[in-house]
C-alpha cells in the first residue's frame, strides 16, 4: 500500500512538471480596422500584443491570405511577451505593406511611359485579418495514441482600401528628352563655333606674319 | 551670313531648352495652395478593442483519443471530456478579464487525421460541441456534436471577459479503417464578437 502511495505521489509530481497548471495566453489590442492607402505606396501599421496570464508566451504576427498579395514586408520574427503584461502595457508590433499597381492606366509608350489615369474602376478593397498566433513548445502526447495538436490565435479585422490617384498624362519624359537633345545640340554648336573661330584667328595671324616678312624683304 | 544663321539656330535651341525645362518643372511642381483665414478646432476619438484568451491545460496538451481496439467505434471521447471533479470537461478556453470585448471562438483542422502511410480518418468523423454554459455531464452535449472542417467556422459566440467556453470532442472510426497512429492539428481562434473568423 505504501508503494502505491509513493508511485501515485511520483506520478503527480511528474505530471505537474510536464503539464504546469499555469498556462500562457495571447492577446491583441487594436484601434483601427481599415486603412485608405494610395496605389504604389508603402505603409506601416502597428498592432499591440499582450499577455495578462501568469506564464510567459511567444507570439507571431501574421496577415491572412486575403492580404498576402499586397504585403511587401512584415516583421514576422517571434515576439516574446512576458507574463502579466496587461493591455495597458501591450507591446507594439509593426508590419508594412506596399500596395501594387492595380488600376488601369492609359500609357502611350510600353504600358509604362507617358501615362494618364482616369480612375474609372471601382475602389479595390482587401478584406482580411491580422492574426496573432501563440507559439508553443512541442506538445506532449498524453493519450498514448493518435490525436490532434492544438493551436491558439486571436485576430483583428483589417480592411485596406487602395486609393486610385487620378492624374493627367505625364509628359515629363518628353519634355526631359527635348531639353536634353536641345542642350546637347546647343553645346555641340557652341563648341564647334569656338573651334572654327580659333582656327580662323590662327590662320589670320599666320597670314599677317608672312605679309610682314615679305614687306621687310 | 553663315555666322548669323548659326547664331539664330543657337538662339532657337536655347529657347527650346528653356521652355522644355520650364514645362518639366511645371509638370512636376506641387500644387500651389492659398491660405484661408478661418478659425477651427479639432474633434477626435479613438476607439480601441482588446481581447486575450488562454487554453486550459487540457487543451494545451492536445486532443487525444487513446488506443482504440474495437472497430467500428462511434463517439469515442477525448481524454479530458469528462475528467473534471464533477465530470465536467477540462477542455476550455478562458477569456481574460483584461479584455474590453466579448469573444467569439472559431475552429478548424488542417486536414483529416492522417497516419504515416497517408491513411486518413475523414473530418466528418472528428466532432465537437462548445458552450458558454457551466459544464456538467450533459454540457457540452454529445447530441449537439458538429464535424470539424478545414476552414474556420464559429463554434461558440459571445464569451464575455472572465468567462470560459467549454469544449468536448468525439471521434468515429469506420470499420475498415487501417491501423496506425493518426494525427492532425486543430486551431482555435478568438475574434471580437460579431467579427468574421477569417481564413
Image: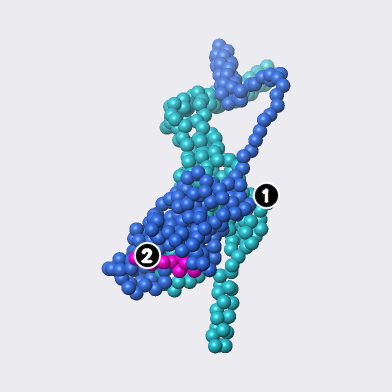
* Residue B35 to residue B144: above or below: above
Task: Give the image location of residue B149, x and y in percent.
Answer: 39, 54
Q: Which residue is mark 2?
A: B75
Kindly identify the residue that appears in the image at 36 percent across and 59 percent down. Answer: B123
Q: Is residue B176 left or right of residue A79?
A: left
Task: Name which quarter of the figure residue A11 lies in.
Answer: bottom right
Colour style of the rendered protein structure: by chain
Name the main secondary structure of what is drawn in magenta: loop
Mark 2 or mark 1: which is in front?
2
Spatial separation of the CA atoms under disc 2 and disc 1: 44 Å
Residue B111 appears in the figure: no
- Quadrant housing the N terminus of chain A: bottom right
Task: Give the image location of residue A82, x and y in percent.
Answer: 65, 59
Residue A88 tag number: 1
Task: Give the image location of residue B52, x and y in percent.
Answer: 58, 53
- Judged from the image, the secondary structure of the residue bearing numbered disc 2 is strand
Residue B23 appears in the figure: yes
Kindly identify the residue that appears in the image at 70 percent across and 19 percent down. Answer: B38
What colour do you see for chain B? blue
The magenta span reads B74-83
Chain that bears disc 2: B
Amino acid at each position: 500500500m505504501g508503494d502505491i502511495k509513493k508511485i501515485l505521489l511520483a506520478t503527480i509530481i511528474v505530471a505537474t512538471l510536464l503539464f504546469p497548471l499555469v498556462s500562457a495566453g495571447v492577446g491583441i489590442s487594436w484601434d483601427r480596422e481599415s486603412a485608405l492607402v494610395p496605389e504604389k505606396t508603402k505603409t506601416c501599421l502597428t498592432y499591440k500584443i499582450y499577455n495578462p496570464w501568469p506564464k510567459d508566451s511567444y507570439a507571431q504576427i501574421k496577415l491572412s491570405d486575403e492580404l498576402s498579395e499586397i504585403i511587401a514586408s512584415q516583421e514576422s520574427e517571434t515576439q516574446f511577451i512576458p507574463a502579466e503584461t496587461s493591455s495597458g502595457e501591450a507591446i507594439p508590433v509593426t508590419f508594412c505593406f506596399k500596395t501594387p499597381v492595380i488600376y488601369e492606366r492609359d500609357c502611350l509608350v510600353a504600358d509604362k511611359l507617358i501615362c494618364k489615369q482616369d480612375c474609372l474602376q471601382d475602389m479595390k478593397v482587401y478584406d482580411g485579418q491580422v492574426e496573432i498566433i501563440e507559439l508553443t513548445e512541442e506538445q506532449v502526447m498524453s493519450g498514448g495514441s493518435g490525436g490532434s495538436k492544438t493551436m491558439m490565435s486571436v485576430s483583428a479585422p483589417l480592411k485596406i482600401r487602395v486609393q486610385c490617384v487620378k492624374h493627367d498624362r505625364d509628359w515629363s519624359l518628353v519634355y526631359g528628352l527635348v531639353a536634353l537633345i536641345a542642350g546637347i545640340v546647343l553645346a555641340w554648336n557652341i563648341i564647334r563655333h569656338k573651334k572654327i573661330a580659333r582656327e580662323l584667328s590662327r590662320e589670320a595671324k599666320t597670314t599677317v606674319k608672312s605679309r610682314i616678312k615679305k614687306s621687310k624683304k | 551670313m553663315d555666322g548669323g544663321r548659326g547664331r539664330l539656330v543657337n538662339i532657337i535651341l536655347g529657347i527650346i531648352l528653356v521652355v522644355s525645362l520650364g514645362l518639366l518643372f511645371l509638370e512636376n511642381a506641387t500644387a500651389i495652395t492659398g491660405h484661408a483665414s478661418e478659425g477651427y478646432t479639432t474633434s477626435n476619438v479613438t476607439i480601441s478593442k482588446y481581447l486575450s484568451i488562454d487554453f486550459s491545460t487540457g487543451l494545451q496538451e492536445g486532443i487525444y483519443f487513446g488506443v482504440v481496439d474495437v472497430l467500428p467505434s462511434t463517439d469515442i471521447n477525448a481524454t479530458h471530456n469528462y475528467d473534471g471533479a464533477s465530470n465536467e470537461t477540462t477542455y476550455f478556453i478562458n477569456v481574460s478579464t483584461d479584455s474590453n470585448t466579448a469573444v467569439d471562438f472559431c475552429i478548424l483542422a488542417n486536414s483529416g487525421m492522417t497516419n504515416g502511410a497517408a491513411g486518413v480518418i475523414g473530418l466528418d468523423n472528428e466532432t465537437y460541441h462548445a458552450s458558454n454554459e457551466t459544464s456538467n455531464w450533459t454540457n457540452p452535449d454529445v447530441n449537439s456534436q458538429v464535424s470539424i472542417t478545414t476552414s474556420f467556422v464559429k463554434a461558440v459566440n459571445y464569451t464575455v471577459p472572465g468567462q470560459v467556453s467549454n469544449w468536448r470532442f468525439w471521434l468515429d472510426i469506420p470499420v475498415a479503417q487501417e491501423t496506425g497512429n493518426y494525427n492532425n492539428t486543430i486551431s482555435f481562434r478568438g475574434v471580437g464578437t460579431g467579427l468574421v473568423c477569417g481564413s
